[in-house]
Image: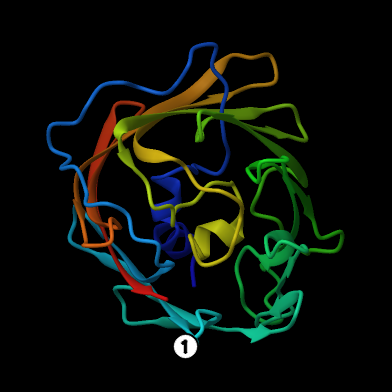
Amino acid sequence: MSVRKIKKICSYVIRTLLVFSVLNSCQKSVSEDLDDDTPIPPVISDLNCLPTKIQITDQDGETYSTNYFYSNTGNPENCTENSPDGSVFDWTMKPGSRRIDLIYNQWIEFDDSGRVSKSRMLFIPYDNDPYSTAYFDSYTYDTQGYIVSVRTVRDPNPLVTYLDSSLTLTTNTWDNGNLVKSKTVYLDGRSTEIDFTYNLSVTSTGNEVLIDSYVSALFPGFFNTGKGNRNLKTGMTYKFREPDGSIWSGGTESYTNHTFDGQGNVLSYKVGSVSDGNSDTSTVSKSYRCF
């Protein structure tokens, strides 16, 4: 699986929080503006609804999808990534009481509250591949249960690394139940900053990526990474900064035309992106299983 394919599979994340990093701004990011294209969803159910499929169709018509499978009690068992060329990558779970083991010595550990606390993931997950690079993530939550930081350390013995730094620290800022600010600082002093906007009239059911990590990129909503946003995310603005603070790149993402199911879960939405003068559109569709 190429780096491009992995990034495509994970573009749901990139289009909802990532761009391989995260934010800073002096102004409050929550927007009171309403999106006329966004209908008000029904009252959110008390059921726990987890994603069974997330599909991304880009403007060229290429489709990338990830399918998620659970036990009858809602425990994750397996997920598969599907690419336009027909290739399928299978993530079989081996659950334990405080840890889930994945293929190629990858794993996810949980704290006493069932939240992700640590993980070891490969950037290109192939066994004995010299271009596979392992990263260890450590997750921190505040007293209210929101994810406030993620520290990433590169495996000390990789042959090749595709990421620019061996250590990053992402910090998140929450306001009124929404993730409004996030900033990732790299070992070399560069940083990425993202501001988020929300429709405060629409309540979110969660099941979205909240943190800059490979776990959240592959498994959005699949594992517990703390409380989700209170309201529906409508966009983000991101900036890439040099160590001296100057901006070398940036862009915006907008999320419109949302549709909902009877439980209040988002079924689909359109993504519009503008970066360094280039624009792109795609459609994200989702399905769920409720327990």
Viewer-nearest residue: 220 or 227 = 227
Which quadrant would residue 289 be assigned to in this image? bottom left
Q: Which residue appears at 69% of the width and 81% of the height? A: 104
Q: Which residue appears at 41% of the width and 23% of the height? A: 30
- Picture coordinates of residue 116 (x, y %)? 68, 61
Q: Which residue appears at 72% of the width and 40% of the height? A: 142
267 to 16, vertically: above or below? below
Viewer-nearest residue: 4 or 41 = 41
Residue 239 as seen in the image, left or right of residue 121: left
Q: Work out whether residue 274 can be spotted.
A: no
Q: Work out whether residue 79 can be spotted.
A: yes
Q: Which residue appears at 85% of the width and 63% of the height? A: 157
The type of colouring in the image is rainbow
How packed mark 1 is, by other alpha carbons closer than 10 Å (few <14, some 14-19, many 20 or more), is few
Viewer-nearest residue: 201 or 199 = 201
In the image, farthest residue toward the right: 156
Residue 22 as seen in the image, left or right of residue 254: right
Which quadrant would residue 56 be assigned to in this image? bottom left
Task: Check disc 1 and report the residue beneath it.
Answer: 72
118 to 78, vertically: above or below? above
Query: Which quarter of the rendering shows the C terminus?
Result: bottom left
Viewer-nearest residue: 174 or 263 = 263
**Count of all numbered marks drawn on residues in the image:** 1
- Picture coordinates of residue 73 (x, y %)? 51, 84
In the image, farthest residue toward the left: 36
| Residue type pointed to by label 1 | Asn
Disc 1 on helix, strand or loop? Answer: loop
- Picture coordinates of residue 222 (x, y %)? 51, 67
